[in-house]
Image (cartoon, rainbow, N blue to C red):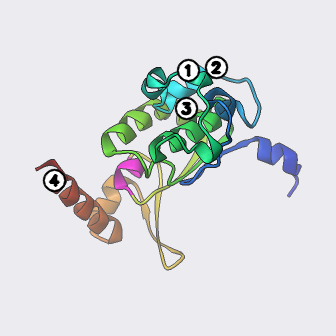
Amino acid sequence: RTVPLARLRAAIGMVTQEPFLFSDSLAANIKFGGGDAMPVEEAAAIAGLDTDVSAFPAGFETTIGERGITLSGGQKQRTALARAVRREPAILILDDALSAVDTFTEERILSRLRDVMRARTAIIVSHRISTVRSADLILVLEGGRIAERGTHASLVAEGGIYAEMHRRQLLQQELEAS
């Protein structure tokens, strides 16, 4: 209540499952929201977008169309992630921000994000265990209330909701691999 709203908003970087993008270049979309804390190319690399950009006809200057129509769902999410990371906010909120990428790409992005998240508060909302397993504290919600809390290891050991989700997701990964 004592922090001015503009200052609070400036301290938060948020990436949602369905990010909003503009009919402009990829670089302009990453730069949107201000700040010059980090070069566009570095932010794109952290977000795992760098390999995609090299295949775009004009690289970072490629126009992505209204709402990012020319991008896949994962590319849209990674563009928004690069935008948030580039600002180097004190608080980083990822709301199912990696749901449109495969688990291999997700792991690559998360490994790049670990250094970024180490220096700030990160709040990650996800249905995937792989996204949250290295968090310091995991809260499991059921019916709008906290049903379980702990680390990945402690929650798996408890054998509750989280452990069941973990078991189902491991089984699904095994089925997809075969």
Q: Earlier in the sequence, mark 4 or mark 3?
A: 3
Which mark sits nearer the N-terminus, 1 or 2? 2
Q: Name the kind of residue labelled 2 in the image.
A: Pro
Spatial separation of the CA atoms under disc 4 and disc 1: 39 Å
Give the amino acid type for the residue marked by disc 4 in the picture. Answer: Glu
Residue 99 higher or lower than 89, as above or below: below
User: Type of residue at label 3?
Assistant: Val
Residue 121 at x, y = what percent?
Answer: 61, 43
In this image, 177 relative to 43: left or right?
Answer: left
For the residues labelled 4 and 3, the Cα–Cα distance comes to: 31 Å
The label nearer to you, 1 versus 2, is 1
**Residue pictured at 64% horizontal, 32% vertical:** 30
Q: Nearer the viewer, mark 3 or mark 2?
A: 2
The residue to which callout 2 is attached is 39
Which residue is denoted by mark 3 in the rendering? 116
Vertical relation: 168 (above or below) 152: below
